[in-house]
């Protein structure tokens, strides 16, 4: 088993858990460009790895309550059957390079539009985040756009996270970034499983390759999902913007070195903006009392506790004294 491939899986897993996207847009190019894996084998193996990896991240978000289950159901109703259709279309077109090039470029443009949407939402949100309690699910457009995502994923393995993120942002801009990531991760589980099954039926799947990716990606997605479900919405939004930009540039076949420079500059800009906005936001607002730091809570390995039980225990102790 290639340790370098497992390390690459770890990095991609963290990104997927943190942002809900990046699996196909990052892992498939890595397998093809850096490890010399044939594209068809890379697509099918990446889908198989994602089908095992994403349930771990989805489980973390489900426990934290950052999943909109109504959206998941309607998206899957369209995406799961169309994923099989995407695999069949890919086989019918042979290598389908020209078709995949068009899909790749279109997806890159969509990712950049998603970046613009996230930045516009951050600008309009001002001082606070809107809740998704008033969110009204629109079944027909959700199913249709889920079907579009399924076809793209079945053909290219790209889009189970990135394209669905774009769809959710377009239809439901009121979704909080944490809920956006959680919903996207959970809906992607049956989607990538259906696409992986379709590729396995045609004998494209390489289990040893998928296993090497999974060794690193499973712990990576657990780490990323824990960070995402607990992190402030602004942090998750910044991570989404950075990954969207990096994925779009890779889809446009921009050299890796140039992508690294852009990501570094974007990250520095996000840090600078965050540090400048924090004093302005907190001006005139009383500072909350500092709480003791729990190392287990920071690491994400603590177990959920019922705060009411703790309060009742403290009250009983005070009465006994």
Image (spheres, rainbow, N blue to C red):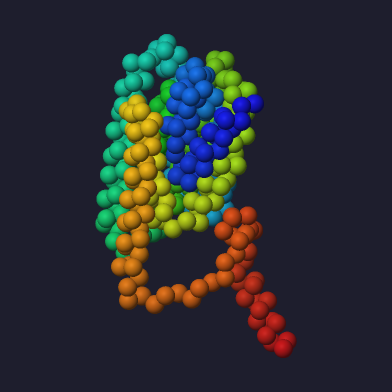
Residue 157 location in percent, x, y?
A: 46, 27
Quarter of the image where one finds residue 111: top left
From the viewer's perspective, tell me whether residue 106 is left or right of residue 162.
Answer: left
Q: Residue furthest right?
A: 320
Residue at position x 32%, y 48% in the image? 118
Q: Quadrant of residue 301?
A: bottom right
Residue 5 rendering spot, x and y as whole percentages: 56, 29
Image position, residue 237 (x, y; %): 38, 50
Residue 275 horizontal side relative to residue 16, left or right:
left
Q: For the point 33% across and 39% down, which residue is it?
A: 262
* Rendered position, 80 above or below 118: above
Residue at 26%, 50% in the rendered image: 120
Q: Of 171 and 3, which appears nearest the observer? A: 3
Q: Nearer the viewer, residue 198 or 56?
A: 56
Q: Is residue 243 above or below residue 100?
A: below
133 and 186: which one is in front? 186
């Amino acid at each position: 088993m290639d340790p370098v491939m497992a390390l690459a899986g770890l990095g991609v897993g963290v990104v997927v858990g943190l942002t809900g996207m990046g699996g196909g847009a990052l892992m498939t190019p890595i397998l093809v460009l850096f490890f010399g894996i044939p594209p068809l084998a890379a697509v099918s193996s990446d889908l198989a790895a994602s089908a095992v990896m994403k349930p771990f991240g989805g489980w973390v978000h489900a426990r934290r309550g950052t999943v909109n289950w109504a959206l998941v159901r309607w998206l899957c109703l369209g995406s799961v059957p169309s994923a099989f259709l995407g695999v069949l279309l890919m086989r019918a077109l042979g290598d389908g390079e020209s078709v995949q090039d068009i899909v790749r470029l279109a997806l890159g443009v969509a990712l950049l539009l998603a970046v613009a949407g996230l930045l516009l939402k951050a600008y309009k949100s001002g001082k606070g985040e809107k809740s998704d309690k008033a969110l009204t699910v629109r079944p027909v457009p959700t199913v249709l756009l889920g079907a579009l995502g399924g076809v793209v994923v079945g053909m290219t393995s790209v889009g189970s996270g990135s394209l669905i993120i774009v769809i959710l942002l377009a239809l439901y801009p009121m979704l909080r970034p944490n809920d956006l990531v959680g919903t996207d991760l959970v809906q992607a589980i049956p989607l990538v499983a259906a696409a992986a099954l379709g590729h396995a039926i045609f004998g494209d799947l390489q289990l040893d390759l998928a296993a090497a990716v999974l060794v690193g990606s499973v712990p990576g997605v657990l780490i990323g999902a824990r960070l995402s479900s607990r992190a402030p919405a602004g942090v998750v939004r910044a991570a989404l913007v950075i990954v969207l930009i990096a994925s779009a540039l890779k889809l446009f076949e921009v050299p890796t070195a140039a992508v690294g420079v852009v990501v570094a500059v974007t990250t520095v800009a996000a840090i600078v903006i965050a540090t400048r906005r924090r004093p302005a936001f907190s001006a005139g607002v009383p500072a909350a009392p500092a709480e003791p730091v729990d190392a287990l809570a920071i690491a994400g390995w603590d177990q959920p506790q019922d705060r009411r039980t703790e309060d009742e225990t403290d009250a009983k102790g005070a009465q006994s004294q």
